[in-house]
Amino acid sequence: MTTENRPYLTRLIAVCVLILLFILVISALRARENRFFRIGASNSQNRETLPNTVNRRDELQSDRWRDGFRLLRYWWIGGAAVYIAEMDRTAENLQFAVELSNNQILGRETITDATRRLTRKNVLSLAGVNGSFGIREDNRGRGGMTFNLHIQNGELVSIPIRLDRWGYSPPSAWGETSFGVTPEGEFLLEAVKLNGKLRIAGDTLPIDAVNQICDSVCPVVLFTPRFGRRTLTRRCHEFTLRQIKLPLTGKYTSRFVVTDVNSRGNSTIPSDGIVLAIEPRLARNWVNKITKSTAGTLEIALTPKKWQRVQQGIGGNLRLVRDGEVEPELLEFGLSGGRSARSHRNGASRHPRSALGFNDEKLFLIAVDGRQPGYSMGMTLYDMGRFFSELGIKHAINFDGGSSSTLWALGRVANSPAHGYERRIFNVAMIRARKK
């Protein structure tokens, strides 16, 4: 390189550095000017002892808190803003609940729209975080559907099989990620098994899932009216069951009669019945046993047994904290940089995240902002597990994250979603005022 070219190269490098600095400054200013930061906040750092990994903690909209409820923002030293809505477990005026978007499995809805819909029913929501994983859309017309467990007001709306695949709960202790609340207020965090059976003339057909995709991996599925208008399957053998009790519950037995048989799939789901879908290869063993007017019995018994009485339940995909410590499989995952579980390698990168946790005193709904330079870059799953443990959270699970990560509280979105707007999601974990 000639001497006369060196000043030009130096100037070019200087210009590039200045442009980069300009972009970082603008990003930081935009983040600080974002409407989400104009929520009334006061610094509470001196009121309680905070972990060394917390730079500051803000109390958000404290003038609107109800007894037993708090809304906080933690500034994690690693470069992330963590929003947490807390509920005292002993608060008689508050309760945990779940809400299915649009009141059915198919389709999505923002938390804001869900809370407005509930308000029209005189249900007061204090906070909600996006919950389960799912697909946003596919070429079969599914405009969104959850992959995880959902129990609402005692109704078994959705339960999948366990798969070692991102979005599902893997078949190990790491996948103990269904959170449920019993009528007595006991919190459960476990893997839940369906144990569904169809009994016809001495034959027993095990049921794999409720309101999930029927395929070779999950070959026998029940579709209830809570799924949507049609099953949207292809080439499955389907049987319409009527004269059956609805809704399904965690402990369930009902007689039924088959009123329709369809070998092409995509059956209409009757409002007073259920559609049984069987994957084509397995269906060969049953097409001659299940015909029109065939009668039988459907049985469901969730395990562990306490789940048969759960009133509100929701699932995630991976466990973050167990008994106050980082989940052992997550610890290995974090130390290996995600190499110990490649099907979940998304969790080894920093992204926006959502989660649910609890200890003996409180329930926590959590959103971590990310993908916003100068403000918050997000967390890995290991980061979350370690940070939650430091905050005193005893058990925690991971919810759907990315641009879906949203914590709605006290009438508005409290955090700053990654895309700059509130994305429609599958279901919501909520803190509500208890009806008198």
Image (spheres, rainbow, N blue to C red):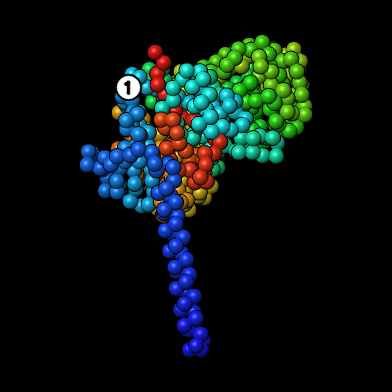
Residue at x 77%, y 27% (from the top left corner): 263
Q: Is residue 379 visible?
A: no
Residue 281 placement: quadrant: top right
Classify 353 as above or below 433: below
Q: How many marks?
A: 1
Residue that carries the numbered disc 1 in the rendered image: 91
Between 184 and 45, the one lying in front of the other is 45
Kindly state the secondary structure of the residue where label 1 is placed: loop
Q: Is residue 52 visible?
A: yes
Q: Badge 1, how many Cα within 10 Å: few under 14, some, many 20+?
A: some
Left or right, 247 with respect to 373, comes to: right
Between 315 and 118, the one lying in front of the other is 118
User: What x and y, as percent, mark residue 212?
Assistant: 61, 30
Left or right, 313 with respect to 324, comes to: right
- The quarter in which the C terminus is drawn is top left
Classify 248 as above or below 83: above
Residue at x 42%, y 41% (from the top left corner): 36
User: What x and y, as percent, mark residue 347?
Assistant: 47, 47
Residue at x 48%, y 43% (from the top left corner): 417
**Residue type, label 1:** Ala
Left or right, 408 with respect to 239, comes to: left
Classify 297 as above or below 372: above
User: What x and y, as percent, mark residue 204?
Assistant: 64, 20
Between 124 and 215, the one lying in front of the other is 124
Residue at x 49%, y 22% (from the top left corner): 119
User: What x and y, as percent, mark residue 80?
Assistant: 39, 48
